[in-house]
Image (cartoon, grey):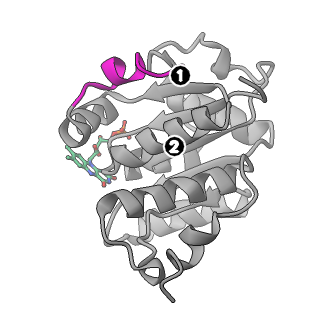
Amino acid sequence: MGGLPIIIGITGGSGAAIAKRCIELLTAHERPVLVVCTPAGQRVWQHEVGTPLRQWLRTTPARQYPIGDVAAPIASGTYPTGGMAVVPCSMNTLAAIAHGLSTNLLERAADVILKESRPLVLVPRETPLSVIHLTNLLTLARLGVKIVPPMPPFYARPTSMDEVIEHIAARVLVALGVTSALPYDQQYGNGLH
Ligand SMILES: Cc1cc2nc3c(=O)[nH]c(=O)nc-3n(C[C@H](O)[C@H](O)[C@H](O)COP(=O)(O)O)c2cc1C
């Protein structure tokens, strides 16, 4: 495993499979992965993925920190990390990060990433978006946070949910700076047009 660890924060927004694929891709790129998940995130993961998060993580080299462990290394700016993605990002956690709250380890880790000017990527999942959601997104975008909504790549003519998830996860890695560009077939489809 090479390079600084990447933190994957998982919340109770819909889209746990995107977090799963991000962890798989980061591992494939030999990046250490540190996971922190809210209670709602664990519940939605169980509902959408089928296997409990903790059980699935045992099949990976990723390390999980308890949500209440505010003394974990990622709660401090002195611990070097390469960035963080909150995927999926609920509107609750979005609001907390936008307002500098640190009521759990995920929020604290994101606050640390911001204060240390490291890459922070959010995959917000809600529709429609209220003025409150949009204001919070704008606040964070102005701070340099990359906002990567889980948008299907219609132009690539995806034929399965897996293809959509693959595309969004690949975009998260680009936003984190782990990869430099989307593979060609994820930009324009598999040579179909
Ligand atoms: C199946 C399921 C799907 C959900 N999807 C979303 C969602 O897409 N976006 C969102 O903001 N909240 C969603 N929620 C609600 C959040 O889980 C809830 O607001 C929770 O308090 C978020 O807490 P957290 O930010 O600590 O994870 C969903 C809840 C469930 C049970």
Q: Which residues are magenta?
A: 51-61
| Residue at numbered disc 2 | 22
Along the polypeptide, which appears first: circle 1 or circle 2?
2
Q: Amino acid type of disc 1?
A: Ala
Label 1 within 8 A of ligand 1 by Cβ: no
Which image quadrant is residue 163 in? bottom left
Q: Residue at 51% across / 89% down in the picture?
A: 193
Q: Please give the label number shown on residue 62.
A: 1
Work out whether residue 36 or residue 49 is closer to the camera in this orientation and state it: 49
Work out whether residue 120 or residue 170 is closer to the camera in this orientation and state it: 170
Residue 103 visible at all: no
Q: Amino acid type of disc 2?
A: Cys
The x, y position of residue 165, in whole percent, is: 41, 57
- The local secondary structure at tag 2 comes to helix
Q: Is residue 79 covered in magenta?
A: no
Q: Is residue 130 left or right of residue 117?
A: left
Q: Is residue 179 above or below residue 103?
A: below
